[in-house]
Image (cartoon, rainbow, N blue to C red):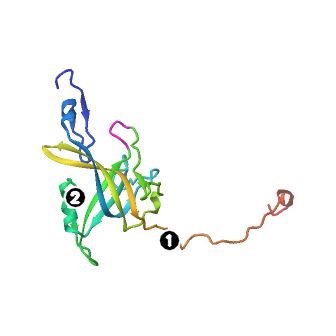
Amino acid sequence: MRSGRKCLWNNSLTHPVKLTLNQILKKRLKMAIIKNVEMYFAKLNPKRPNAKFNKKNPTWEVQIRTTDKAQSKEWEKLGLSVKAFIPDDGAPFYRVNLRKKSIKEDGEPSSPVSIVDGKLNPVDPDTIGNGSVGNIRVFQYEYTSEGKKGIASVLMAVQLTKHLVYTPPARDDDFEETETEMVAAEAYEHSEDF
């Protein structure tokens, strides 16, 4: 590397790639809003990113779906990695998994994914049920990794337009409500049972 040229790491979703400052300035960066998507498996709690696939750098994530082939083509034009899925039951659909790492390349914590309703009020991320509908904002940038070019998409924000509220089911092993007897400390201090 020539002296005087600063070398930085990009925030690729696959592998880190060394970039010079000139290469970074030439990259096309943009924000995109993906409208009217169904959401599934939202793991967006700021305090609990998903560590299932990467324990060192957990991610906030959501899967977006559509049954509309034209919408899936629009997603492909945005550079999203669209996968067709044919379930055993139900209609075929197209899906995209979107993520945001909880730790930046420089070791600093990332800001969590913003979640709002249609009036831009904050929403509890743990209440987003499968099938909720809304808009997704992603940050996109071009990258080159091992000679292959692509577009990385980082999940930035979710706006719910149809909020299917998730309520965790009651557990079979939970306590049930019962009476509690209160006994003053002096009543049992001299008791032989204690």
Q: Residue at x 63, y 72 (%)?
A: 176
Residue 78, percent from left and from top: 21, 53
**Circle 2: element type:** helix
| Lower sequence index among marks 2 and 1 | 2
Q: On the rendered image, what quadrant is the N terminus found in?
A: top left
Identity, as a three-letter code, of the amino acid under mark 2: Trp
Residue 94, percent from left and from top: 24, 66
State which mark lies toward you, 2 or 1.
2
**Circle 1: element type:** loop
Identity, as a three-letter code, of the amino acid under mark 1: Pro
Residue 55, percent from left and from top: 37, 50
Q: Are marks 2 and 1 in contact (CB under 8 Å)?
A: no
Magenta range is 103-107
Q: Residue at x 28, y 42 (%)?
A: 11
Q: Residue at x 56, y 71 (%)?
A: 173
Q: Nearer the viewer, residue 149 or 35?
A: 35
Based on the displayed image, in which of its 4 quarters is residue 71 positioned? Answer: bottom left
In the picture, the disc for residue 169 is 1
In the picture, the disc for residue 75 is 2
Q: Is residue 187 left or right of residue 127?
A: right
Residue furthest out toward the left: 147
